[in-house]
Amino acid sequence: MSELTGAEDDGRSHRHPAGRKAQLAAYVTEVGQVTVGSLAERFGVSIDTIRRDLDHLALEGLLVRTYGGAVSAAVSSRVEKAVDVRLGLQAAEKEKIGLLASQLVRDDTGIIMNGGTTMLSVARALSGHRDLTIATNNILVPAELDPAVWRELYIFGGSVRSTTLATTGATTLRVATGGADLDIRCELALIAVGAVSSQGGYTTNNVGEAAMMAEMMSRATRVAILADSSKFEKQLFAQVAPLAAADYLVTNAAPPKELRDALADAGVQVVTPESFSEVAKAG
């Protein structure tokens, strides 16, 4: 039996699932960011096959899935992640958090929502609510909201950050006729943060975003911080607020003991899928 030539071996490994996935992972590591379509063409397989391969490699931690493709693990580890990358991170956890956060919202009230991909899960989970007045700096949120949910919807102006697709600027609404700023108040602020720690409180990477988030919190009667468990006991560059500035921490899993104790001392109720019924009764 003759030995395979290099070209024959390469083609056969493309067809063999294990060989193809190994080459795919190496290629993504080399180029950094890829699309499903380009991979299907390069490896000569269907788009569905590539999607399955990428899903498996993501589960193995070899790359990070994004909308329409993937990025290498090295790219995804950067402090500032682009929106399409972050949409694929902790997706199941964000859906749980979004559902829990939506249940803290009362119909016929005003809410403020900040930037971040977690807020897209919240927006989708609000589908059963009615007559809400919603203000946000997240320019992706309106497309995720069912029009039946809101009575009034406002987007805060300011400069848009390409990494978050959210505006930074003053949390005010300008009166069209007189040009004056309106003081706004709401019943609940939903604020997604980059990290939560017992020592540093709630933090994020950008100073402008931190200032806007803090101002949003100051406008609300109740404040719910949203953060998945991967953000526990981490501290980023800019502090948004100390732990006691929030009424709730909405998350997918119970925090570690030190953080849990610090939250309790600060009067913050931790809302998880397991604890929500108790929090709802208390509220």
Image (tube, rainbow, N blue to C red):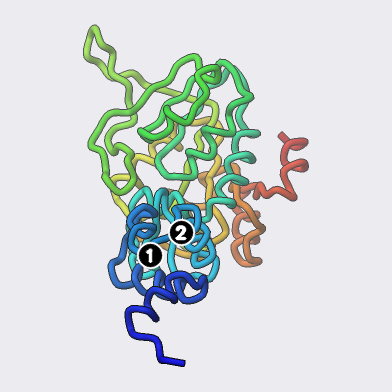
- Residue drawn at x 32%, y 79% is 7
Pointer 1: what residue? Answer: 43
Give the x, y percent position of residue 253: 65, 57
Task: Inspect this view and state whether residue 84 appears.
Answer: yes
Residue 10 location, quadrant: bottom left
Pick the front one: 137 or 5: 5
In this figure, what is the number of numbered marks? 2
Give the x, y percent position of residue 84: 37, 49
Question: Do the residues under discs 1 and 2 have CB atoms within 8 angstroms?
Answer: yes
Pick the front one: 132 or 44: 44
Distance from Cα at disc 1 to Cα at disc 2: 9 Å
In the picture shown, does residue 231 fall above or below 103? Answer: below
- Quarter that holds the C terminus: top right
Pointer 2: what residue? Answer: 50
Instruction: Left or right? Give the position of 136 relative to 268.
Output: left
Q: Amino acid at mark 2?
A: Ile
- Residue drawn at x 33%, y 56% is 38
Instruction: Left or right? Give the position of 264 relative to 33.
Output: right
- Residue drawn at x 40%, y 40% is 115
Give the x, y percent position of residue 26: 37, 74
Q: Amino acid at mark 1?
A: Phe
- Residue drawn at x 53%, y 51% is 91
Give the x, y percent position of residue 5: 34, 85
